[in-house]
Amino acid sequence: MTGVVVLCSGGIDSATLAYKVAVERKLDRLISFDYGQRHRREIEHAARIAAALDVRHDVIDITALGQFLTSSSLISGGEAVPDGHYAQDNMKSTVVPNRNAIMLSIAFGIAAGAKADAVGIAVHGGDHFIYPDCRPGFIDAFRAMQDRALEDLWNVELYSPFTATDKAGIVAEGARLGVPFDLTWSCYKGGEMHCGRCGTCVERREAFHLSGIPDPTQYEDADYWLKAIQEMKAGKEK
């Protein structure tokens, strides 16, 4: 058994998946992508996670492609990353069109070349509202497509154990597995410290709170998440 190739952004979800694979299956390597994202420092954190797991870490440079994905606020030079809760429409500006489809296609090619057993991706239930390529329908369709793309060549499983799990559930699972949360990075703004205001920071702060797990993260605005949740709930009640 060669193992599982895990897509790792350096965040809580992919770090937890990496540890889950290392404990429950066999971890082949971590793969990160540089697509010109303004929060490129996440790749440094993915490297730290790989080092903690003593596993190979490959960084795939697709910045030449990223320059064409400028419709997203996550691309350097694009519009500002919005503040607020993920369940608000303004978060749609953080969608990078086809990002998971692009990354998974490359990862499957790498996995087939390495004769790996699976490609792991940490999409989760909390992403469904904003990101179409994190929904179960996309995962099922991509799995079916790859079965055809590699037919008669090599069988590579698409492993996505968190599709129906929310962020708090992933934090709880990460704590069980001993994930060093202090090595992970979530903030989309990519500053020296987690901003505490963007969608990923709000989601991160809320997930630790709901799971009852201590949050080791330092935020520039540690209490903003409460306001963001109140605004999100108020919007839903209108």
Image (spheres, rainbow, N blue to C red):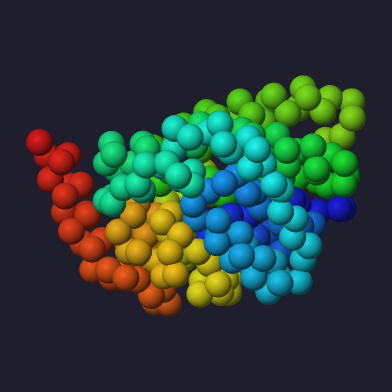
Point out residue 227 in the picture as x, y percentages from the top left corner.
18, 58
Question: Quick check: can you spot residue 203?
Answer: no
Q: Is residue 172 above or below residue 67?
A: below
Q: Is residue 204 above or below residue 33?
A: below
Work out which quarter of the rendered image holds the C terminus and state it: top left
* 184 left or right of 82 in image: right
Q: Nearer the viewer, residue 36 or 100?
A: 36
In the picture as drawn, the residue positioned furthest to the front comes out as 77
Point out residue 162 in the picture as x, y percentages from the top left corner.
53, 49
Q: Residue at x 44, y 69 (%)?
A: 192
Point out residue 231 in the picture as x, y percentages from the top left corner.
16, 50
Question: Quick check: can you spot residue 84?
Answer: yes
Answer with the quarter of the image where residue 102 lies.
Answer: top right
Answer with the quarter of the image where residue 188 lies.
Answer: bottom left
Q: Is residue 15 above or below residue 222?
A: above
Point out residue 47 in the picture as x, y percentages from the top left corner.
67, 65
* 57 left or right of 190 in image: right
Q: Residue at x 76, y 71 (%)?
A: 54
* 120 left or right of 151 in image: left
Q: Residue at x 48, y 35 (%)?
A: 70
Q: Nearer the viewer, residue 101 or 68?
A: 68
* 173 left or right of 207 in image: right
Count up the numbered dots: 0
Q: Residue at x 64, y 70 (%)?
A: 48
Q: Nearer the viewer, residue 118 or 69?
A: 69
Answer with the quarter of the image where residue 212 lies.
Answer: bottom left
